[in-house]
Image: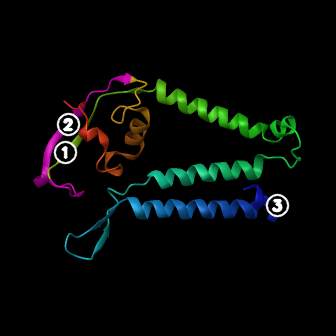
Amino acid sequence: MDGALQKTPNKIATSKKAACRAIKLFILGVILQGGYIHGRHKLTYVIDLDHIRWLGVLQRIAIGYFLAAISEIWLVNNTSVDSPVSFVKKYFVEWIMAIVISALYIGLVFGLYVPNWEFKVQTSSSTFSNPTNDIGFKTIQCGLRGSLGPPCNAVGFVDRVLLGESHLYKNPVYKRTKVLI
């Protein structure tokens, strides 16, 4: 990003470029990972907005890129770096932001209580939910804080609460673990 700032002294134009790149990466992630259903023996595609995966890996990378680019564009002062002390002075605000964001993340991962939860089990691999392919519900026993395992971690809990289970990965690891009852 530093090279882009040297070529473009206009911070607004550089911010627009960073936002455009982040949007392209986000859209690419949506197209590659989520919600597109195609017929088994047909060349038809359908966008299923009830099951589209909004926050997959590429989308999260796009959000992280955007935040890092904006902080690099707007928060770094233009002093030259010729010693370790000047390096710390130049990036002081960014270091503080990184420490605060990391502390918040670690606090949520290890401090957020994850209750027991259920998910619907289907007989077919179809993402369309209908009464003919539903088996029932499986319960995952969590009831704890600080778990880093796939079924009971705080990140998955926040995703389930904010996005809903239908917008998450269709074949997650927790469906194959021994945590199920």
Q: How many numbered circles are shown?
A: 3
The magenta segment: 124-144
Q: Which numbered disc, 1 or 3, marks the residue that appears first in the sequence?
A: 3
Q: Secondary structure at mark 2?
A: strand
The residue at the point 60 percent across, 33 percent down is 102
What is the basis of the colouring in this image? rainbow
State how far apart marks 1 and 3 are (Cα). 54 Å
State how far apart marks 3 and 2 are (Cα). 56 Å
Closest to the camera, between mark 1 and mark 3, is 3
Label 1, residues with CA under 10 Å away: few <14, some 14-19, many ≥20: some
Vertical placement of residue 30 versus 98, above or below? below
Q: Residue furthest left?
A: 132
Q: Amino acid at mark 2?
A: Lys
The residue at the point 82 percent across, 40 percent down is 87
Q: Is residue 127 magenta?
A: yes
Closest to the camera, between mark 3 and mark 2, is 3
Q: Is residue 83 magenta?
A: no
Look at mark 2 in the image and give the residue it sits on.
138
Look at mark 1 in the image and give the residue it sits on.
121
For the residues labelled 1 and 2, say whether their Cβ atoms are less than 8 Å apart.
yes
**Image x and y of residue 13, in percent:** 74, 64
**Image x and y of residue 175, in percent:** 25, 41
Q: Which numbered disc, 1 or 2, marks the residue that appears first in the sequence?
A: 1
Vertical placement of residue 10 versus 68, above or below? below
Q: Give 142 or 162, whichever is nearer the viewer.
A: 142
Quarter of the figure with residue 160: top left
Q: Does the rendering let one see residue 62?
A: yes
